[in-house]
């Protein structure tokens, strides 16, 4: 049995519980503000792990690296930024923290279905990964020291961003910014990030963008001058009135914003997948031939919805998934076989892409003593083209969610 078949068999037939809940609770209790996460967010974490084969991991690494090289090709940047807002043309010389590359494990190998900036969950998944026990069938185990290495690596990523933009000046203050942060589902990881930054000697604050002010060429928050903003906003181009101070500071070069509008335009606008998956167009833009082949085979066919192709897309809709070009979190995304005529009119009038459906793989788990199967989405958290951490999201339904019994984040184990 080859490694891929073995990983598939384990995902199908191994019902081990690999999560040591007591150990995870202990990790979360290191921050008094996150000690109750397991009770307040009961479907954050699954109790099992997802298995992949080394060749699947290698394929995902190759795709992520190929995207990174393609994005840095002058021809690609010129083509993408030509249609982007002016703020996306501000180049701080940085890479953008926590890029998220989402894969489905299709029959043709891992397929990249989406790229996200400010991908959430990495801090939580670092804690989850170090709270795993051995799987009786796969004999997998995780060294708890790995979490400390990941945590340190995450902080180093922010320091690297700072050095790339600001040289040898010390990084003193970070603001973690999101709209109404305490109401965000992933607020517990803001608390974890804040604690890690402070342990590294960096003053860290969590703030709504309306709490920021731009005065005397400096961004301020709660009486502190801010050096770097860890951006968790979904107003990717800072166009909303509440983000005015942050926008002004970014445009003036008075604060380092990461990830910023440029990263969203170059990576996460979903129209880019139609370009990244088109070998002919990439070659004409000067992208390396081997990278074009890697991307063409690793990205499902994607195209923008336009008046000239709308009819053919409607006729083939059952094989397609429709997503808003600037969407996030699976909002306003639709499987073609679920479309109504009314929704289709909204899609045609909106800014959508159509992507060939790659059915997610499945993971067998036990819920209330009964075996069941959940869908699997694999997320690679990456920085500058290198994968830092792999995590899975287990769910039922049309898109990923944290409402499924037995679902949530799960660690990824490589077998073989």
Image (cartoon, rainbow, N blue to C red):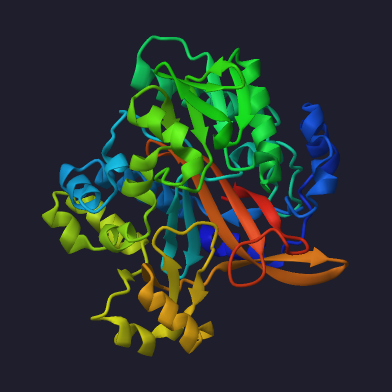
Q: Is 301 situated above or below 228?
A: below
Q: Quadrant of residue 396?
A: bottom right
Depth order, front residue of 308/299:
308
Nearest the eye: 412 or 217: 217
Q: Is residue 35 above or below residue 373?
A: above
Residue 190, by quadrant, is: top right
Expressed as whole percent of the image width and height from the top left, the position of residue 53 reads: 52, 54
Residue drawn 40% across the image and 27% down it: 249
Q: Position of residue 219 (x, y in %)?
A: 47, 22
Residue 401, position as x, y percentages in the image: 65, 61
Where residue 76 appears, as percent x and y from the top left, is 20, 49
Q: Residue at x 61, y 49 (%)?
A: 412
Left or right placement of residue 390 versus residue 260 in this view: right
Report the number of discs: 0
- Residue 131 shown left or right of residue 53 in the figure: right
Q: Quadrant of the N terminus?
A: bottom right
Look at the image and tell me whether residue 9 can be seen.
yes
Whether residue 386 sits left or right of residue 410 in the image: it is left
Which residue is more in the foreground, 412 or 204? Answer: 204
Q: Of residues 73 and 171, which is closer to you in this image?
A: 171
252 on left or right of 47: left
Residue drawn at x 60%, y 53% as measured from the top left: 392
| Residue beneath the point at 64% across and 72% down | 397
Residue 146 shows up from this direction: no
């Amino acid at each position: 049995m080859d490694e891929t078949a073995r990983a598939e068999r384990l995902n199908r037939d191994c019902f081990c519980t690999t999560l040591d809940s007591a150990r995870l609770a202990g990790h979360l209790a290191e921050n008094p503000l996150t000690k109750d996460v397991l009770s307040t967010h009961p479907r954050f974490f699954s109790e099992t792990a997802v298995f992949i084969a080394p060749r699947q991991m290698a394929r995902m690494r190759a795709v992520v690296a190929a995207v990174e090289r393609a994005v840095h090709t002058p021809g690609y940047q010129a083509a993408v930024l030509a249609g982007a807002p002016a703020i996306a043309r501000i180049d701080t010389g940085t890479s953008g923290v926590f890029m998220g590359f989402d894969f489905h494990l299709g029959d043709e190998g891992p397929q990249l279905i989406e790229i996200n900036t400010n991908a959430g969950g990495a801090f939580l998944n670092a804690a989850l990964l170090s709270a795993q026990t051995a799987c009786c069938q796969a004999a997998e185990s995780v060294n708890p020291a790995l979490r400390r290495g990941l945590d340190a690596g995450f902080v180093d990523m922010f320091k690297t961003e700072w050095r790339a933009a600001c040289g040898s000046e010390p990084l003193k203050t970070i603001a973690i910014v999101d709209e109404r942060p305490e109401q965000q589902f992933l607020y517990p990881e803001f608390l974890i990030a804040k604690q890690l930054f402070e342990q590294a000697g960096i003053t860290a604050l969590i703030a709504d963008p309306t709490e920021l002010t731009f005065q005397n060429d400096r961004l301020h928050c709660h009486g502190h001058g801010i050096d770097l903003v860890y951006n968790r906003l979904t107003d990717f181009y800072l166009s909303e009135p509440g983000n005015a101070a942050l926008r002004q500071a970014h445009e003036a070069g008075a604060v380092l914003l990461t990830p910023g509008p440029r990263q969203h335009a170059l990576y996460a606008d979903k129209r880019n997948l139609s370009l990244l998956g088109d070998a002919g167009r990439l070659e004409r833009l000067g992208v390396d031939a081997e990278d074009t082949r890697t991307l063409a085979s690793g990205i499902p066919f994607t195209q923008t919805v336009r008046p000239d192709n709308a009819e053919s897309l409607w006729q083939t809709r059952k094989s397609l998934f429709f997503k808003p070009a600037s969407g996030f979190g699976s909002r306003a995304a639709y499987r073609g076989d679920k479309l109504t005529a009314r929704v289709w009119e909204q899609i045609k009038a909106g800014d959508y892409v159509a992507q060939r459906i790659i059915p997610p793989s499945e993971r067998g788990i036990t819920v209330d003593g009964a075996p069941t199967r959940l869908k699997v989405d694999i997320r690679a958290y990456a920085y500058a083209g290198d994968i830092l951490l792999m995590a899975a999201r287990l769910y039922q339904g049309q898109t990923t969610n944290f409402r499924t019994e037995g679902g949530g984040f799960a660690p990824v184990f490589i077998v073989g």
